[in-house]
Amino acid sequence: MAGTLALAAGATALAVGLGGPDLALDRTAAIRWMPRRAVHVLLCGVLIGAVLPGVLALGGQPASLALVVRNSAGLMGLVALGAAWCGGPYAWLPPFASLSLALVVPPTPDPATQVLTWMLLPPGTTAGTWTALVLAVAGTAVYAVGGPRR
C-alpha cells in the first residue's frame, strides 16, 4: 500500500511537466513532437519506478518489481490521459481520482471492481495487469498524438 501511494505521489508530481508554458509553440514547432512526448511519458514512468525501490529499501520494506512496473506504467498512462484531457496543470486529477476510488471501493472478485482497484491488486493479477497496460498504451498514444490540452 505504501508503495502504491508513493508511486501515485510521484506520478502526480511529474504530471505538471507534461504541459509546456506555451501551447502554441508546442503545436507549431518545426520538430516532431509525437516521439518526444511518448519518450517523456515513458521516462517519467521509469523515474518514478526507479525511485520507489530505493526508498522502500531504505525503510526496510521489500518492493515487488512486478507491482512497481505495473503501477508506474498505469499511473503514467493516467497522467498522460489527464494532460491530454485536462491540460498540464490538471494532469494529476485522473491518477488522484483513480487512487481515491480504489481506496474506498471494497475489494471483491468481481471483474469490474478489480478494474477499478487495479493499483491495489497483488502483482500477477490479470485484471490489474491488463488495466495498467491499457492505460499506459492508451494514455501515451493519446498524449503523443494530441499533446496537452490548451
Image (cartoon, rainbow, N blue to C red):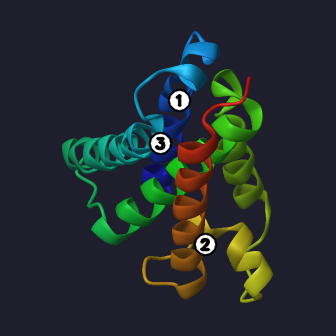
132 relative to 78, above or below: below
The residue lying toward the viewer, choosing from 82 and 31, is 31
Q: Which residue is tagged 2?
A: 131
Q: Give the residue drawn at x 53%, y 45%.
A: 144
* Residue 38 appears left or right of 57: right
Residue type for callout 1: Leu
**Residue 28: % across, % down:** 57, 21
Q: Disc 2 to disc 3, how far (Cα)? A: 24 Å
Residue type for callout 2: Thr
Number of the label disc, if any, that sits on residue 18: 1
Q: Give the residue drawn at x 62%, y 17%.
A: 23
Say whether disc 2 or disc 3 marks the residue closer to the N-terminus.
Answer: 3
| Residue extending farthest front | 30
Q: Nearer the viewer, mark 1 or mark 3?
A: 3
**Residue 57: % across, % down:** 20, 49
Q: Disc 1 to disc 2, how far (Cα)? A: 22 Å
* Residue 87 appears left or right of 119: right
**Quarter of the image holding residue 150?**
top right
97 relative to 86, above or below: below
Secondary structure, mark 3, is helix
Secondary structure, mark 1, is helix
**Residue 85: % across, % down:** 75, 39
Q: Which residue is tagged 3?
A: 34
Query: How many neighbours does mark 1 have within 10 angstroms: few (below 14), some (14-19), or many (20 or more)?
Result: many
Query: How many neighbours does mark 2 have within 10 angstroms: few (below 14), some (14-19), or many (20 or more)?
Result: some
Say whether disc 1 or disc 2 marks the residue closer to the N-terminus.
Answer: 1
Q: Disc 1 to disc 3, how far (Cα)? A: 13 Å
Residue type for callout 3: Met
